């Protein structure tokens, strides 16, 4: 299975200013597989340590963090010499041993010749809890579920990905049904690696759903295992309320939908916990526009999306027949699924700030506003090919963006101020600079 992150890892390996690398991401998005595959492809030798199951390793890091001593201990554990030029050291579930995280500072300062990659599914939480963390002494890489582009590669449609990269829209239009069919499959399967691999091999939607249910059950277990006891009921209620929040016309998060009378202060920590785990995307509102968009962020108004569109469909019990045949029952939820999909793709684009816009009266809402660093691009999301874009026009009249995007199932078309970008080509937004 091809992951775009592999290219980033190879770049990191060859960098002259390489620091220990920390991979962040939700459980089951493929961090362990990626690190081991990277070791297999790019190094003569890999030393893999899982801190969740090795108490002896915890003891090694419990004493002083002298790098020579640590390397000697790791060599004794591995039963062989560690060659700094040709060996990859993998620290998995590194949040279980905070001192192993702290040691990265000393590896960077005193033994930068060693290639060290770390990951942990609850790393974000460990960092927020004040674990001694070597700020500025490590590089970060965020790993998400497979994007639609990676999904196309996984199911054998490499040439269709190339067409998108070349932006050959007349040719893409000729084959649009292939893209649309694959997109509907992706809405159901999502991007969790195990689900994608199973689907690529067996094309069995029922098997995919079993995998998704298992992943969701594992997430719920994480709540009770790793979150403070008093927070667990709130986490569950918040997590389970997200599909109904997204099904609303106005997708702004409303605490009262979690529990009647619920207030922000009871649930803020739960939102931060889910966000630190990589299980949700929090997209904040902006009420004006300029570079950087972050300067206009309204921290009180936001939307919450799940880590994966397939898991969202699983939580709502959406059947593949409903999705693939366009059942009426599905019409209500189609907007939510499409917006979840777009959010998920935008989040995989590096250095892209993702927000949404509403004016102060709430009479104009633009689904997403993205900051590419060079341009601010408003994005209106349409589930089908209904192309009325009233809010986008209002936004354009107020802020005069160089380029505006409407993404839907319609074909690519560039008008004076508006680009119709097909949903299956949404990742091409990063190449637009007005």
Image (tube, helix red, strand yellow):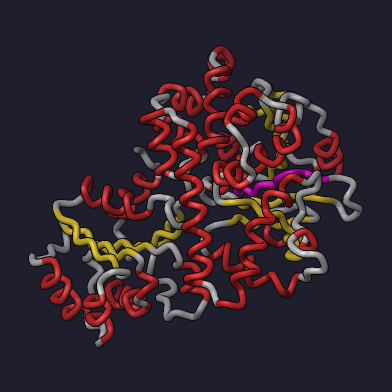
Q: How many marks?
A: 0
Indicate the position of residue 173 as horizontal and vertical percent values: 59, 16
Q: Quadrant of the C terminus?
A: top right
Residue closest to the far left: 80
- Inspect the magenta stretch and tell me whether residue 370 lies in it: yes
Nearest the viewer among 90 and 16 is 90
Magenta stretch, main secondary structure, is strand
The location of residue 168, given as percent across then percent down, is: 53, 20
Instruction: Choose top left, top right, bottom left or bottom right for residue 41.
Output: top left
Q: Is residue 403 visible?
A: no
Q: Is residue 284 magenta?
A: no
Q: Is residue 334 left or right of residue 164?
A: right
Residue at figure coordinates x 49%, y 63% from the top left? 221
- In the figure, is residue 304 to the left or right of 29? right
Q: Nearer the viewer, residue 101 or 405?
A: 101
Front residue (pair 263, 75): 263
Q: Is residue 161 left or right of residue 422?
A: left
Check the image and report above or below for 431 versus 180: below
- The residue range painted magenta reads 365-374
Q: What residue sits 40% from the left and 31% below the top?
A: 200
Q: Could you say where residue 324 lies in the image, as x and y percent from the top left?
A: 60, 25
Up/down of 10 relative to 426, above or below? below
Q: Position of residue 33 (x, y in %)?
A: 32, 50
Q: Is residue 357 visible?
A: yes
**Residue pictured at 44% horizontal, 37% vertical:** 207
Q: Residue at x 55, y 51 (%)?
A: 307
Is 56 situated left or right of 51 in this image? left
Res 400 quadrant in image: top right
């Amino acid at each position: 299975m091809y992951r775009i992150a592999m290219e980033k890892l190879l770049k990191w390996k060859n960098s002259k200013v390489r620091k220990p690398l920390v991979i962040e991401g939700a459980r089951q998005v493929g961090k362990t597989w990626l690190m081991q595959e990277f070791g297999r492809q790019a190094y003569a030798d890999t030393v893999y340590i899982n801190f969740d199951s090795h108490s002896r390793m915890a003891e090694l890091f419990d004493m002083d963090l002298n790098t020579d001593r640590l390397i000697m201990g790791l060599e004794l554990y591995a039963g062989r010499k560690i060659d700094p030029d040709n060996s990859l050291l993998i620290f998995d579930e590194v949040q279980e041993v905070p001192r192993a995280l702290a040691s990265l500072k000393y590896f960077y300062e005193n033994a930068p010749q060693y290639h060290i990659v770390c990951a942990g599914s609850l790393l974000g939480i460990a960092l927020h809890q004040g674990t001694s963390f070597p700020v500025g002494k490590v590089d970060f890489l965020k790993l998400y579920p497979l994007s639609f582009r990676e999904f196309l590669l996984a199911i054998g449609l490499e040439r269709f990905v190339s067409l998108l990269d070349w932006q050959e829209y007349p040719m893409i239009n000729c084959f649009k049904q292939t893209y649309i069919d694959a997109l509907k499959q992706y809405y159901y399967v999502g991007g969790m690696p195990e689900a994608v691999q199973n689907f690529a091999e067996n094309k069995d939607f029922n098997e995919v759903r079993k995998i998704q249910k298992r992943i969701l059950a594992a997430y719920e277990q994480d709540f009770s295992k790793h979150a403070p006891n008093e927070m667990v009921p709130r986490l569950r209620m918040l997590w389970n309320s997200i599909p109904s929040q997204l099904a609303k016309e106005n997708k702004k998060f409303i605490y009262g939908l979690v529990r009647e009378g619920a207030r922000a202060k009871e649930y803020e920590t739960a939102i931060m916990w889910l966000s630190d785990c990589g299980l949700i995307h929090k997209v904040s509102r902006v009420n004006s526009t300029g570079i950087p968009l972050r300067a206009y962020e309204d921290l009180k108004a936001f939307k919450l999306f799940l880590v994966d569109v397939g898991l969202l469909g699983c939580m709502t019990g959406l059947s593949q027949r409903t999705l693939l045949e366009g059942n009426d029952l599905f019409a209500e939820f189609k907007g939510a699924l499409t917006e979840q999909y777009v959010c998920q793709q935008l989040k995989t684009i590096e250095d892209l700030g993702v927000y949404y816009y509403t004016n102060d009266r709430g009479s104009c809402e633009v689904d997403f506003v993205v900051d590419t660093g060079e341009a601010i691009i408003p994005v209106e999301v349409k589930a089908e090919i209904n192309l009325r874009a009233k809010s986008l026009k209002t936004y354009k009249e107020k802020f005069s963006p160089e380029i505006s995007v409407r993404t839907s199932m319609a074909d690519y078309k560039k008008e004076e101020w508006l680009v119709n970008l097909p949903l299956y080509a949404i990742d091409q937004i990063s190449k637009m600079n007005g």
